[in-house]
Image (spheres, rainbow, N blue to C red):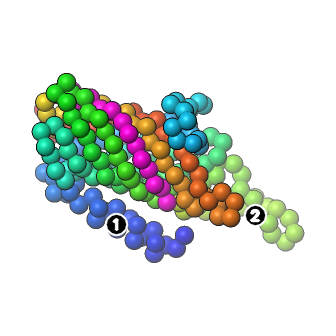
């Protein structure tokens, strides 16, 4: 994938996350993941566990009572033991519908860029034979849809620390042009969001 396209995408992510910089005190979000190459909504939890971790922040576009519309930006790492390991940058438009009980219904739609590397040996054909080579990685776009549920530890405060879970359905493109153009994934995610300066 041309470097110019990657640079433009990173710029779009930063620009799209503008509300984060307008917030006086953006939260920090830490997420643990279990990734699988699977068709979305066919399995609730997948095994074996392929771990991932994500670090991010977010900013609000609008709030109404306990509900809000917001933008996230994050970086992450995924390790699939039999297939790939990848680093990515991701931004999502999210909506939380909050209840006075402390629970939030959550939904996010996102776009990202991932650089993936094989977990096995890489070979290249040279001078009539295959030789061990260096894996320079593959550039992929990510499209995601994630419903979920959260719980605010301070029930009537939208700036409360929150424990949440997301069922993230994401699509990797281009995967293998001419053979498998799109690879589908599921990530079960468990996260914690907090405001560092809150007492």
Q: Which residue is mark 2?
A: 124
- What are the residue bounds of the magenta stretch? 141-155
Q: Nearer the viewer, mark 1 or mark 2?
A: 1
Q: Quadrant of the N terminus?
A: bottom right
User: What's the residue at 25%, 40% (across, down)?
Assistant: 96
Q: Is residue 51 found inside the magenta-colored segment of the image?
A: no
Q: Position of residue 54 (x, y in %)?
A: 40, 44
Label 2 element class: strand
Q: Is residue 162 visible?
A: no
CA distance separating discs 1 and 2: 35 Å
Q: Position of residue 65 (x, y in %)?
A: 12, 39
Q: Is residue 146 found inside the magenta-colored segment of the image?
A: yes
Q: Quadrant of the C terminus?
A: top left
Counting the numbered discs, the total is 2
Of residue 158 and residue 114, the one placed in the foreground of this image is: 158
Q: Position of residue 183 (x, y in %)?
A: 59, 52
Give the answer, above or below, for where 198 lies relative to 143.
Answer: above
Numbered label attached to residue 12: 1
In the image: residue 107, left or right of residue 116: left
| Extreme residue in the right direction | 128
Q: Main secondary structure of the magenta part?
A: strand
Of residue 66 and residue 198, the one placed in the foreground of this image is: 66
User: What's the residue at 45%, 68% (across, down)?
Assistant: 6
Residue 81: name its quadrant.
top right
Q: Is residue 38 visible?
A: yes
In the image: residue 133, left or right of residue 36: right
Give the answer, above or below, for where 73 lies relative to 190.
Answer: below
Residue 15: name its quadrant.
bottom left
Mark 2, Cα crowd under 10 Å, few <14 / some 14-19 / many 20+, is few
């Amino acid at each position: 994938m041309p470097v110019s396209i990657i640079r433009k995408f990173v710029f779009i992510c930063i620009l799209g996350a503008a509300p984060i910089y307008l917030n006086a005190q953006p939260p920090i979000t830490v997420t643990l993941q279990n990734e699988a190459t699977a068709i979305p909504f066919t399995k609730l939890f997948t095994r074996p566990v392929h771990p991932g971790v994500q670090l991010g922040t977010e900013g609000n576009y609008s709030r109404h009572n306990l509900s809000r519309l917001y933008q996230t930006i994050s970086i992450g790492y995924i390790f699939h033991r039999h297939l790939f390991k990848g680093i990515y940058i991701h931004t999502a438009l999210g909506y939380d519908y909050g209840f006075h009980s402390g629970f939030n219904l959550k939904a996010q739609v996102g776009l990202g860029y991932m650089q993936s590397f094989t977990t096995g040996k890489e070979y290249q054909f040279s001078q009539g034979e295959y030789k061990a080579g260096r894996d320079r990685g593959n550039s992929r776009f990510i499209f995601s849809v994630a419903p979920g549920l959260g719980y605010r530890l301070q029930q009537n405060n939208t700036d409360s620390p929150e424990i949440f879970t997301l069922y993230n359905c994401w699509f990797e493109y281009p995967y293998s042009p001419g053979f498998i153009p799109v690879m589908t994934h599921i990530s079960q995610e468990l996260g914690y969001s907090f405001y560092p300066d809150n007492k």
